[in-house]
Every structure is written in C-alpha cells, then in structure tokens.
C-alpha cells in the first residue's frame, strides 16, 4: 500500500525542497502522511475546475506545481477563494503537495526538460547555487543556459512552439538575429535577462514577462521568447504524472484533464 509519505519521499528526492527559492512554499502543504494513496492527480495550479475533477475522480492527493496555500493564511473558510479551494480538498480528504521552484531547478526539472527538448548542449544552471551545503545539490541552481548550432530567433521560436504544442509565441528582438546560446527560466522569469546577458546568451526563453521587462531586454540587446506561463510549465506536470506512474505501481496517476490556460486567443 502506498501512503502520502511515500509520494512525498519520492518527490523530495526528485525535486529536493532545499532547491526551492527562499520566498517559496513547497513540500506537503496539506494532508496526513499516513493516509493511503490510490489516486494522484498532478496539475499546474489548483483551481475550481481542478478541485472538481479531483473530487469527481476520487483523488487522494494532488501534486500542484503552484503552491496552495502560497502565503500565510489565518483562516480556512469558504469566504475566500483560497479558503474555498482548501476547504473543498480538505473535506474530501485530499492531500496537497507542491514542488514549485524546487521542480523548476531540479536535475530533471522543468528548466532542464526545456533545455533537453530544445536539444541544447553544455547545459548549466543560469544562476548556480551560491554554496550547496548538501552534496546532492552540487552543480545545481536556478534556470538553465545551453548552446545550440547557430540558428535564427524565428527558427528557435518555432522549435519552442513545436515542443510546447502551442500555435504561436511572443518574441522580443529581430527575427533574423543569430542565436548560439539560450537562457531558460520557466514561468515568469523576466529577472533573468541580466544574468542571461552576462552569460553570453542572445535570448531568454521564459513563459511571460512584463512590458517594461521586454523594453529592458530590447535595450540590453537580448531577445526573448514568451510562449505563455501555462505552456512553459504545464507539459512538465504531464511528464511528472508519467514518472509517478512508473514509480508507484498500483497507484493511478494522471495530469488534470480539466485545467486549461486562462489566456485564450480569439480565433
Ligand atoms: Zn509557474
């Protein structure tokens, strides 16, 4: 029999919580480690649709990339959106685990999967850990950078769109610009433009960025590829579900089928 603690142990090995950013809230956020687990659902974010699906499918545990709760809460009641989601999950006995930035930065984490998907070589953390107190974290850090054969920004943008199965991506920069080194930060990592420029990258791939960050990138002469926050991370919750399926025989694991990108194109 698999229990919540077994799944936590596996996730902790796969994405050590010591890798998470200081401001983050990761690990087992709700639940009883001794509860048995027969069904696990992964998702990018806990929303109403995700909670309804978890309850309808009788999930015992939700592994959500984005933490809930994220900030300190003083009450869990249906008076607030977060309270409502937590109360629905808790009253149905559903545990919640979030790996978030530990998953972004892990050895086999989201940024590494993006680098592998784009077939980059010489892949390294964009911002290495200052000092790894733990040997298992040696050589790790935030974001990734890697090299590729010379290609244009337009060609790279097409590869990103193909890998992430999106119809289009936003870009900042000249379509014909030559790219040989790429910086990667899934989600919302506009703050990486400076470390990316310092590391000799011509482009930063991140999910989304603020308008003024895009202007700053333009001024620094660094291109950006922005496929959307959802697309830049959601694929990895599908591969995480596949990993958990392999690891826990007898446990049904799936990536939420009901969650979708809240941002839609008009046509
Ligand atoms: Zn995110």
Image (cartoon, rainbow, N blue to C red):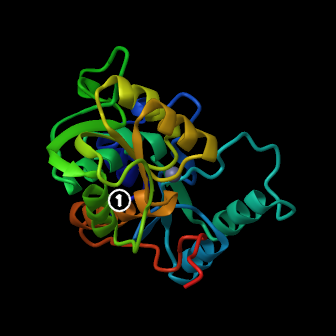
Identify the residue position indicated by label 1 in the image: 236
Image quadrant in which you'd find residue 1: bottom left
Q: Is residue 25 visible?
A: no
Element on which disc 1 rests: helix
Q: Residue at x 54, y 59 (%)?
A: 95
Q: Can you say whether 199 is above or below 11 in the image?
A: above
Q: Which residue is drawn at 77% across and 58% down?
A: 83
Left-right relation of 86 to 231: right
Q: Which residue is drawn at 39% across and 71% down?
A: 166
Give the camera-side residue of 189 and 250.
189
Q: Where is residue 80 in the image (x, y as percent from the top left)?
A: 83, 59
Label 1 near ligand 1 (CB < 8 Å)? no
Give the camera-side residue of 92 and 183.
183
Find the residue positioned furthest to the right. Answer: 79
Q: Can you say whether 136 is above or below 45 in the image?
A: above
Total marks shown come to 1
Q: Can you say whether 107 is above or below 230 in the image?
A: above
């Amino acid at each position: 029999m698999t229990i919540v603690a077994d799944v936590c142990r596996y996730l902790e090995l796969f994405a050590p919580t010591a890798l998470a950013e200081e401001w983050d809230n990761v690990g087992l956020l709700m639940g009883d480690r001794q509860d048995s687990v027969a069904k696990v659902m992964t998702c990018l974010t806990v929303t109403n649709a995700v909670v309804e699906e978890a309850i309808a499918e009788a999930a015992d545990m939700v592994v959500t990339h984005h933490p809930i709760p994220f900030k300190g809460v003083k009450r869990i009641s249906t008076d607030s959106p977060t309270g409502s989601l937590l109360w629905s999950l808790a009253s149905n006995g559903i545990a919640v685990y979030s790996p978030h930035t530990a998953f972004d930065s892990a050895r086999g984490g989201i940024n590494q999967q993006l680098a592998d998907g784009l077939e980059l070589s010489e892949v390294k953390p964009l911002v290495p850990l200052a000092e790894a107190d733990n040997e298992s974290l040696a050589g790790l850090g935030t974001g990734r950078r890697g090299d590729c054969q010379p290609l244009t920004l337009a060609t790279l943008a097409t590869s990103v769109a193909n890998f992430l199965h999106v119809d289009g991506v936003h870009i900042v920069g000249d379509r014909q610009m030559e790219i040989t080194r790429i910086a990667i930060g899934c989600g919302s990592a506009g703050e990486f433009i400076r470390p990316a420029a310092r590391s000799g990258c011509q482009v930063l791939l991140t999910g989304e960025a603020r308008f003024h960050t895009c202007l700053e990138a333009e001024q620094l002469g660094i291109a950006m590829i922005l496929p959307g926050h959802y697309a830049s991370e959601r694929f990895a919750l599908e591969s995480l579900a596949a990993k958990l399926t392999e690891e826990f025989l007898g446990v049904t694991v799936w990536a939420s089928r009901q969650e979708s990108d809240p941002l839609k194109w008009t046509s």
